[in-house]
Image: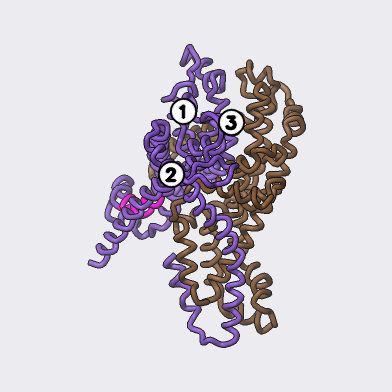
Chain colours: A brown, B purple
């Protein structure tokens, strides 16, 4: 479609810019507020801090335990991403390259599972983790985060592996590679775009996950993640506004940076979701 | 899914040689880890979430007080449950109408050829999607607080005299939830729409131009009708997401004031883990029953929309066949 008139075009640009500024202003506000003193935060109407109060970050990082929350979030996210990539790549490879008996049934099952009405699965998950004795480490949170059918990722891997030429696999076999070596030496490196999409999407989801870490760390404050720890901040340090803004910035900045650098893969993954 | 099944069917048709046998065995080995994780950590919890709903159970004592459908009966007679159901519907309708509508306008603009800065705008409008909802809730709670940024700004330009109690009034708090929920998810819908728009062949537009159709005529007669199948998918995703609104509600309003913004997911959480909130111990069985109801509501709505999209696609196919 073509928008012809120049004035209309400029008008649209102006509108998109103003709306876009308001759109992300909460984040700009958060970063600016994280550098104000608490007095300034309450009294000043200027959006900019008079001087940069980096001590807000020290307070959030040390006193409000954001250093621990940050490490927990990093460990939880990386471990979950690794597990999910391995699981869905293996499954996708089997489904995309081998026509084993029952293959169609497995694909139907992978898709069909999205439509099973779920009850409140966090309760049994919580019970399960407790029975397995995993409530004392991040391991319980990680396996709960890595659960799920990963339907989207499996389908992305399946269709990607299925379109690779058969000659590639035959050449690998000629070179003496077995099934497993062919997979991780030849085929998996070729599937980098799908691996990237899976990594980025799962990274952003897990980083932001709230319900699972909330429930699984109910009695373990030292295992909390950023999203959960932030709520704690609101309760106990309720007068430290700029410290709170610093904590929020610590929590959001990594995921914003990852998104801006890798957005191509994320957006392709999202677009892939509707096409499937 | 059909596409994948078809595309890959051709790789089969091998004879059962020892090689294929070994390949098949390896395929099962590759499936095993995902299968174990799925059975243990997905299917088992799904089944147990139904089982628990038939027990009176606090989560700690042994599971031995079978009560049949008593939890469900109680649920149906509880006004707070139906209230949270209503709030969920408000939230779903609001975020869907605002989010899906506004994102279509944005996508149409960003899909225009020779429009500079597409990638820039896309990044800006998509940004809220990737940020942690539970943190957004805390930030917005501050921005819309009595002495927060919004009231400060409105007062400094003399638009209002007294601060507005955004989160203190039931109606305003609900509106706020909807608007922020729509803001958060709009970028996602925009990408869905863009992928739909990009699947429309450019010849369609060219021939419309040759016929002398302007921007609006092209939009109404070509673009919108061709987007119908994807509309069903986007609506469905938006509704299912809205049905499970928890993070934002918990962190922005926590159901306040007086449970007037409590959604179903928060209702379930409060009964399962908010020990003391509903008076005393956790009621895991009762919460499970409420969770099952939420799952069933979601399924019913999905089925309606699944049917809708099935029929529109079928109609399109028969049209093409003529």
Label 3: state its secondary structure. Answer: helix
Q: Nearer the viewer, residue B143 or B50?
A: B50
Q: Element at badge 2?
A: helix
Residue highlighted by disc 3 = B138
**Which residue is drawn at the image coordinates 35% and 54% (left, top)?**
B306
Same chain for mark 2 and mark 1? The answer is: yes
Local SS, label 1: loop
Give the chain of mark 3.
Answer: B
Per the model, the C-alpha gap separating discs 3 and 2 is: 26 Å
1 or 3: tag closer to the N-terminus: 3
Residue sitting farthest toward the top: B161
Kindly report the secondary structure that dominates the magenta region of the rendered protein. Answer: helix
Q: Residues within 10 Å of mark 1 (few under 14, many from 20)?
A: some
Q: Which mark is residue A32?
A: none
Name the residue carrying label 2: B294
For mark 1, what is the residue? B259
- Image quadrant in which you'd find residue B172: top left
Above or below, B112 against B265 in this view is: below
Side of B204 relative to B58 (left or right): left
**Residue B180 at x, y = what percent?**
49, 34
Left or right, A237 with respect to A271, comes to: right
Q: Is residue A248 above or below residue A128?
A: above
* A21 relative to A242 in the view: left or right: left
Q: Which span is picked out in magenta?
A: B222-234
Pointer 1 and pointer 3 on the same chain:
yes
Q: Residue at x 58, y 31 (%)?
A: B138
Estimate the x, y position of residue B131 in percent, counting from the top left: 58, 41
Q: Nearer the viewer, mark 3 or mark 2?
A: 2
């Amino acid at each position: 479609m073509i928008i012809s008139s120049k004035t209309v075009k400029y008008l649209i640009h102006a509108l998109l810019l103003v709306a876009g500024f308001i759109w992300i202003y909460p984040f700009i506000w958060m970063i600016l507020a994280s550098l104000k003193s608490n007095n300034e935060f309450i009294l000043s109407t200027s959006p900019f801090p008079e001087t940069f109060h980096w001590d807000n970050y020290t307070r959030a990082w040390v006193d409000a335990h954001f250093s621990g929350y940050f490490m927990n979030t990093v460990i939880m996210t990386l471990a979950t991403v690794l597990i999910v990539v391995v699981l869905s790549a293996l499954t996708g490879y089997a489904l995309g390259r081998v026509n084993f008996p029952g293959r169609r049934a497995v694909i139907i099952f992978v898709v069909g599972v999205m439509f099973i009405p779920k009850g409140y699965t966090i309760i049994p998950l919580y019970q399960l983790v407790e029975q397995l004795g995993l409530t004392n480490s991040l391991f319980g949170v990680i396996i709960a985060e890595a659960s799920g059918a990963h339907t989207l990722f499996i389908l992305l891997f399946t269709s990607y592996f299925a379109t690779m030429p058969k000659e590639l696999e035959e050449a690998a076999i000629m070179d003496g590679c077995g099934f497993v070596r062919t997979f991780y030496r030849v085929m998996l490196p070729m599937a980098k775009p799908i691996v990237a999409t899976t990594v980025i999407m799962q990274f952003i989801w897990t980083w932001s996950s709230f319900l699972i870490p909330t429930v699984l760390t109910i009695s373990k404050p030292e295992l909390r993640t950023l999203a959960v720890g932030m709520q704690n901040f609101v309760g106990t340090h309720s007068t430290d506004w700029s410290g709170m803004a610093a904590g929020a910035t610590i929590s959001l900045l990594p995921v914003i940076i990852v998104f801006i650098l890798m957005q191509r893969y994320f957006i392709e993954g999202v677009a892939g979701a509707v096409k499937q | 899914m059909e596409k994948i099944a078809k595309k890959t069917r051709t790789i089969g048709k091998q004879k059962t040689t020892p090689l294929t046998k070994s390949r098949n065995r390896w395929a099962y080995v590759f499936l095993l880890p995902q299968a174990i994780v799925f059975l243990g950590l997905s299917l088992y919890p799904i089944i147990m979430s139904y089982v628990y709903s038939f027990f009176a159970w606090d989560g700690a004592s042994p599971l031995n007080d079978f009560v049949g459908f008593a939890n469900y009966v109680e649920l149906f007679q509880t006004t707070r449950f139906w209230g949270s159901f209503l709030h969920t519907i408000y939230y779903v309708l609001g975020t869907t109408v605002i989010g899906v509508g506004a994102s279509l306008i944005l996508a149409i603009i960003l899909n225009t050829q020779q429009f500079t800065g597409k990638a820039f705008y896309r990044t800006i409008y998509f940004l809220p999607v990737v940020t942690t909802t539970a943190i957004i809730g805390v930030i917005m709670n501050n921005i819309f607080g009595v002495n927060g940024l919004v009231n400060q700004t409105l007062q400094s330009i003399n638009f209002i005299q007294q601060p507005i109690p955004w989160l203190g009034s039931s109606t305003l708090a609900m509106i706020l939830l909807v608007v922020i929920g729509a803001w958060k998810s709009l970028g996602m819908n925009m990408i869905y729409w863009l992928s739909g728009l990009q699947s429309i062949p450019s010849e369609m537009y060219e021939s419309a131009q040759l016929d002398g159709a302007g921007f609006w005529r092209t939009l109404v007669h070509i673009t919108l009708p061709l987007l119908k199948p994807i509309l069903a998918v986007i609506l469905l995703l938006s509704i299912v997401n809205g049905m499970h609104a928890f993070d934002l509600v918990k962190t922005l309003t926590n159901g306040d004031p007086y449970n007037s913004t409590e959604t179903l997911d928060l209702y379930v959480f409060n009964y399962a883990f908010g020990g003391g909130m509903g008076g005393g111990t956790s009621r895991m069985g009762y919460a499970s029953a409420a969770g099952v109801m939420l799952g069933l509501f979601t399924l019913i709505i999905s089925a309606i929309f699944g049917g809708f999209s099935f029929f529109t696609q079928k109609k399109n196919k028969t049209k093409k066949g003529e």
